[in-house]
Amino acid sequence: MPVPAALEPIASAASVVKRFPGGAAPALNGVSMTVEAGRITGLVGPDGAGKTTLIRILAGLLHADEGEVAILGHKPIEMLDQLGYMPQRFGLYEDLTVRQNLDLYAELRALPEEDKEETFSRLLRFTDLARFQDRLAGKLSGGMKQKLGLACTLVRTPRLMLLDEPGVGVDPISRRELWAMVQDLTDEGIGILWSTAYLDEAEKCDRVYLLNEGKLLFDGPPGELTDRAEGRVIQLTGFGEARRPFLSRTLDRPDIIDGTIQGRSLRLLLRDGSPVPEPASFEAGAGTRIAKGQPRFEDGFIEILGGGPKGTSALAENYRVIPPSDRPAIEAKGLTKRFGDFVAARDMDFAIPQGQIYGLLGPNGAGKSTTFKMLCGLLSPSGGQGAVAGNDLRHSAAEARASLGYMAQKFSLYGELSVGQNLDFFAGAYNLRRPDARRAKDAMCEIFDLGDKLNMNAGELPLGFKQRLALAAAVMHQPPVLFLDEPTSGVDPVTRRMFWTHINGLVEKGVTVLVTTHFMDEAEYCDDVSLIYRGEQIATGTPDALKEQAVTLTESDDPTMEDAFVALIEESDRRREADERDAA
Amino acid sequence: MTRLRAIIVKEIFQLLRDPKSRIVLVLPPLIQLFIFTFATTLDVRNVDLAVLDRSSGVHSAELLQRIDGSPNFRKILYVRSSAELRRAIERQQVIAALVIEDGFDEKLTRHEPAQLGLILDGRRSNASQIVAGYVSRITAEMDAETVPQTLGGAQITNWFNPALDFVWFTIPALIVAIVSVSGLAITAQTVSREREMGTFDQLLVSPLRLHEILIGKIVPSFLVGGLNGALYWLVGQFVFGIPFAGSVFLFFISLFTYLLALIGVGLFVSSLSMTQQQSFLGNFIITNPLILLSGYASPIANMPPWLQTLTYINPARYFLVIVQGLFLKGMPAADVFHQLWPLALIAVTTLSVSAWLFRSRME
């Protein structure tokens, strides 16, 4: 087979080091990479890995402390004409319309007046934004914003595009569309650098650079990393035990380095060199079956990081047993929220039995956060009823609040206070008296490994530790109900696993969990999920039931949770359009 | 109690944990107190005066010597023509010009009333009024000595400030102004910062009650404002040597009441704002009228009636009267209470309105 000629690198970085004042470790520690023409190069890693720093150095916005950076053989600052840069935020002027944003970028990029009409109509067609020309950029959905951002960087066709996490805040459907758009651009010979924290996006790149804590862990085609797990992924079905305790027991086995729940089955990663175990060795009944599973990029990443955590949660072992009750722990009855004419959430109906995980899924802006916030008392419902641990939201809000733990989407503890002061505050805010508070604080330090960080400012913690601290603050008072809003957004896969190990353990103690997530594989941990779209519940059921529905809709035999999500939303769109036609 | 203690401790740490912010809370206001004391001088000194002397006699020379000898005048610029005089005023080389007419000496020698012309720069109306006062005082003295009076002039005694030192007047007023500015600035950020950082939701889902959150927000501003107020009170007495004639107890009761009124205003601004930038602007909009309508820069009695009515809702107005009264004239308790009860009423109002606003903007 002929070796393809080496493509000319559009951009390259060699042994780049970047330190920020006050940061203990360098933000980038000897990173080398190239971006080739006509290819999508993935810059992959969790939040805080150094992706944005590297992109900003390539865009000429930051200087590297050490190492060389070149765009088409020149310094970045000399090649700005050849560069399209789409930052993570602030790329658009939210108070200008779609058209005005394009005008502005055309002006900034000195697009000749006579080319303007043609370029704009091409870009608007390409991004499917022609209908929204007069809408304010701030009023667009997450996906449309990213498309507009892309269009703005394309007013003059660049040779290199730096896209900083274009998939963040974008629902799976729009993400697929965005990806297809960018792929079209590579046909024109544009070199693309696509940074992402989603590992499934990494799998689709031509070449991947995997960053973690400023260090390059892997570079090469994503398949190379995925192949390392070849033959070591197994799918376990038919076991006669509840899946959560079974998972934690299984993860404690020495030959298993990672495992997740997938509906009624377990997906396990075997240690390198370990043979595929016998079904009987799992001691989970005669029905236990083992099938080979498809390795993923994430498996490779987890292996580089040294495997996932063991299955037993120290947090759960320390937790009180929540007395069982027949009453639903969380209940929504026709819960509705209107903002003026706009219905953000309509007739939300569900009852979550004690000791279960319930997931709210849906694109950004669909109404899942509104529903979530009504149930934890941050928004007062316009109609319907909600109750937490038997306390009605309207009449006994304070009692309802005392019985829940809350973890917000963004890190929202006090960054300028120390870890210890944060824990002290939340212990006090949740009524823990001094001896109890001290005991709870010591336990949290032990479980989450925060002991040596007590005097650090919470804002300066690495992201993974911020998430641990946030979880610690939410569970210190051992509430019977936990509200988690996108708890694992942006963190590395090992921290995500650790997180779910704790959640699974807590649920076994009788804790009830309401979680919102856009990680479709995390939806698999839920006992039941509700898919929320345009303010309504369009599908409800177990993850397996939702995938089952997708089988009939898409006629594919083994859809993933994400396929199910896309299929159900598209089906809902079709039905709505049909209704609108009938009405017209 | 556990909850309340937790939030107060948290708020105090938030304000004071960073050593830099500890310094920022105390030092800049203190420096302002010193600088503003000298910057807001109300005396007119170092006056330059032009003189067009068409008489050139003994009496005119004596007049000019008296002017030259006065500590208020710095330089006398001798001009030779009206045109030169006009230019000197136009270019603001001098603030006033004295014209001594041709027959000045002759008339005085004949014991006839002689006249002087004084031209003032109307662009600086206040200062030139004062200069006119200086000049007429000098001519009156000269008059009295050359033509002995039989009636005897007025004997002036300045009560409360015998040397008419302007610092005695400005320091108490500055204490009010600086306590207000720094107190408002601290409070106005408290709620909006939590909103901006995303910690507000975290507070609202906790079992903390509304009043506990509010008390938590009030205490640190109250402590810092009270500490700064006490510091200025000491500096005024022991650094600037201003006598404090009134009751210490009444001073602090008034300071605390005023701080509560002020914190109510600050919380109102903060609850209204979604971001720290908005609260900064809101604070800016409030601070200026609060100071200017307090009587700090110009007496309230000189304002148009409708504006005078408006000053009744300004807490700084009452506190200013109390502080100046306690410092210079030992204001009796009954008079202090006369100012204190409206202040207390305003404090109750601003705090309740901001609590109401805080509640209604929790979503």
Image (tube, coloured by chain):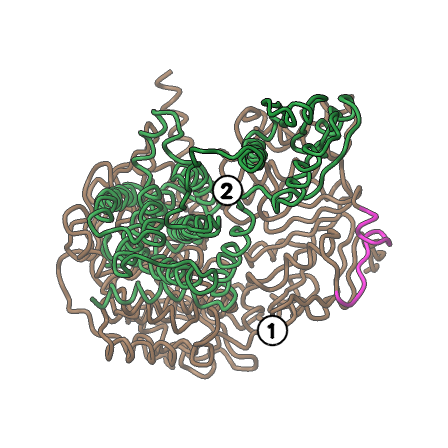
Chain colours: A brown, B green
**Neighbourhood count class around disc 2 (C-alpha, 10 Å): few under 14, some 14–19, many 20 upward:** some
Q: Residue at x 24, y 49 (%)?
A: B336
Percent x, y of residue B109: 65, 27
Q: Which label belongs to residue A331?
A: none
Asked which quadrant contains residue B110, the reply is: top right
Residues in magenta, as a range: A65-79
Q: Amino acid at mark 2?
A: Ile
Q: Check if residue A72 falls in the magenta segment.
A: yes
Q: Chain of mark 1?
A: A
Q: Is residue A372 left or right of residue A80?
A: left
The reply to whether label 2 and label 1 mark residues of one chain is: yes
Whether residue A561 is visible, yes or no, is no
Q: Which mark is residue A173?
A: 2
B73 and A473: which is toward the camera? B73
* Chain on which label 2 sits: A
Q: Residue at x 45, y 84 (%)?
A: A254
Q: Is residue A270 visible?
A: yes
Q: Label 1 belongs to which residue?
A: A24
Quadrant of res A180: top right
Q: Position of residue A536 (x, y in %)?
A: 32, 38
